[in-house]
Image (spheres, helix red, strand yellow):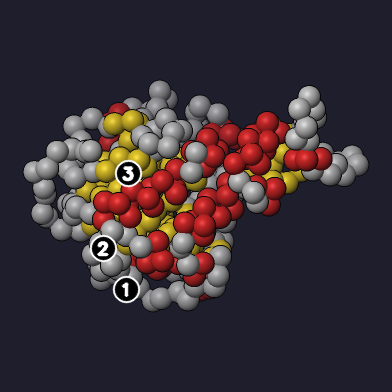
Amino acid sequence: MSDYTGSVVTATKTLKVKRSVRKQRDLARAADGWTECMARGLRILQASTLAKIPWLVHGFSTRPGGVSELQGEKVLNLGFAEWDSKENVLENRRRFQSALGADGLTLVTLRQIHSDVVRLLHAPLAEPCRGDASATNRASLLLAVQTADCVPILLVDPKKRAVAAVHAGWRGTLQRIVTKTIGTMHMQFGTKPADLLAAIGPSIGGCCYEVGTEVAVEFKSQFPNASDWFDELRTGDEPNPLQWLNMSPPGHQPPPKKVLLDLRKANCAQLLVAGLRPQNIIVSDLCTACRRDLLFSYRKEGAKTGRLMSVIGIKGSSLSSSPNES
Ligand SMILES: [Zn+2]
């Protein structure tokens, strides 16, 4: 059974990764470049390019398992929510970390605000700080972003031994959060984009992500190839060309029509423009809205849904005494 149907921008050869302790099944198709780690009833998605790095720990959570109860189903909700207890979420996080073999690392979450704020972390935070991306080259920190439709992106510089986690909804994507994260890594760690590996986890797909035409107009004003990321929303009637994209003269109002946005493509394009090699980018094509059996979707389920977590960190025990952030 193959639940994960990931894809890569350019075919990435799946490397056989052997985890000594944990049961690991490669449910993903070999060419997809994804593997699935199963432990304690949890199913965790990993990018094979990242999984082969011995000092790295990473993973994208999925819905099944955990101790939270959502409409009669046990789910791995990793974000604090009104419908769930704090104890449940903390227990879920503990299980998730344990399944990843990351018990020794300190989880660092952000108070995500759909911004372009990148946090450089040197040590654990007492309280989550506001921001939508974090980066570090210190060991023992497990950087995390939480999503339920938005795009989670994990970055690793294998040469400089630095990592980052990025949360990109349409606002963050428009503000180039992933590009700015790469810029931060370049400035702080000397990262060369050509060395970076990127994994784009499950998010809402271009199949389901409806946005207003004003969003398309904003993207079009920022990115020359933005029209590649949008599709018309076919409602059954006559085909409607993407005329709103050409309606630049002042005074023209775009028609009140929804369009479909492919946020993965938009972020992938930013990675390529930043200088990443196509073969170093792996993209899951699992859609959170289509696959509510496996994932959480805020768009489809509303406030009463869980949060997925994407994490990345450097193994080791050397904690720094530097300030929390800069
Ligand atoms: Zn979909």
Q: Circle 2: is it few (<14), some (14-19), or many (20+) Cα within 10 Å?
A: some
- Identify which amino acid the numbered label 3 is placed on: Ser
Of all residues, the one furthest to the front in this rendering is: 249
Q: Is residue 158 left or right of residue 151?
A: left
Residue identified by numbered label 3: 134
Please give the name of the residue rendered at 54% of the width and 73% of the height, measured from the top-left corner: 11
x then y, percent, for residue 98: 25, 52
Of all residues, the one furthest to the left in this rendering is: 321
Eyeballing the image, is 211 above or below 317? above
Q: Is residue 227 visible?
A: yes
Q: Nearer the viewer, residue 277 or 288?
A: 277
Quarter of the image for residue 235 reads top right
Question: In what quadrant of the picture does the C terminus appear?
Answer: top left
Q: Is mark 1 within 8 Å of ligand 1?
A: no
Q: Is residue 281 left or right of residue 118?
A: right
Residue identified by numbered label 2: 160
Residue identified by numbered label 1: 18
Q: Is residue 93 visible?
A: no
x then y, percent, for residue 106: 20, 45
